[in-house]
Image (tube, grey):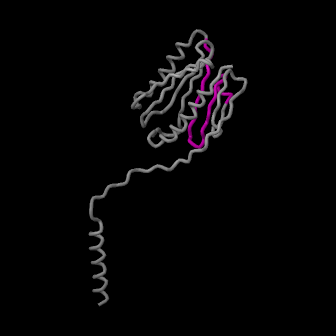
Amino acid sequence: MQAAKSSFIALVTFVLFLTSCGGDYYPKPRGYFRIDLPEKHYIAFDTAYPYYFEYPDYAKLETNLSEPYWVNLVFPMFKGTLHLSYKPVHNNLNKYLEDTRNLAMKHIAKATGIENREYVNRDQNVYGLTYNISGTAAASPFQFYVTDSTHNFVRGALYFKMVPNNDSLAPVIAFLEEDIQHLIDSFRWK
């Protein structure tokens, strides 16, 4: 009697198991962690360097790099770095402009598009161009340069210390692009 009862329970469990999986099964898409973005507060970079700008307080500033007046803004919570390289202009502005364009265009193989936007601030004598590089595998999603056209040139490039997946990084990239735009808007030559 006990064996029949156990067999009946096993049969009912097996039938329920087979019938409970009705309908098509579709796996859920891969999810990403929610990213908490900090409030924006800016700090002035006002040193002996030949330029001034404002940067977010959640970035760490690295100076004394391999070249004079080069700066890195490190965003530890996003594993990203904005590399700023300075060059004095001595009748070689066209070379710097072409180098910047070539470095941005190196991403074309992995990019789905590169949007250029001109920047002009005549009051502060700051002129530039931004490169918004879209595509899931582009190593640098945002690059730019600013210059006074006669004496100074600064190039910036944002990189992340991870395998590029700009779809999942899109909120962070958009967030940092606002900070970089603020940096450009506050940029002044000394």
Residue in view at x 44 percent, y 24 percent: 105
**Which percent across, then down, holds residue 108?**
41, 27
Tell whether 99 sits left or right of 110: right
Query: Image height check: is 37 above or below 184?
Result: below
Q: Residue at 50% x, 42% y: name it.
A: 171
Image quarter of the N terminus: bottom left
Residue 120 seen in the figure: yes
Quadrant showing the C terminus: top right
Quadrant in which residue 81 is drawn: top right
Q: Residue furthest bottom?
A: 1
Residue positioned most to the front = 123
Estimate the x, y position of residue 5 in percent, counting from the top left: 30, 86
On screen, 142 above or below 148? below
Reply above or below: 36 against 11: above
Q: Residue furthest right?
A: 48
First to last magenta residue range: 63-89
76 versus 28 height, above or below: above
Pick the front one: 29 or 162: 29
The answer to which of 46 and 29 lies nearer the viewer is 46
Residue 140 seen from this side: no
Residue 16: percent from left, percent from top: 29, 73
Tell me, yes or no, whether the highlighted magenta stretch contains residue 67.
yes
Location of residue 120 in the rendering, given as x and y in whole percent from the top left corner: 55, 20
Which image quarter: residue 63?
A: top right
Give the residue at x 58% y 14%.
Answer: 149
**Count of marks overlaid on the render:** 0
Corner quadrant of residue 179: top right
> Per the image, is 150 magenta?
no
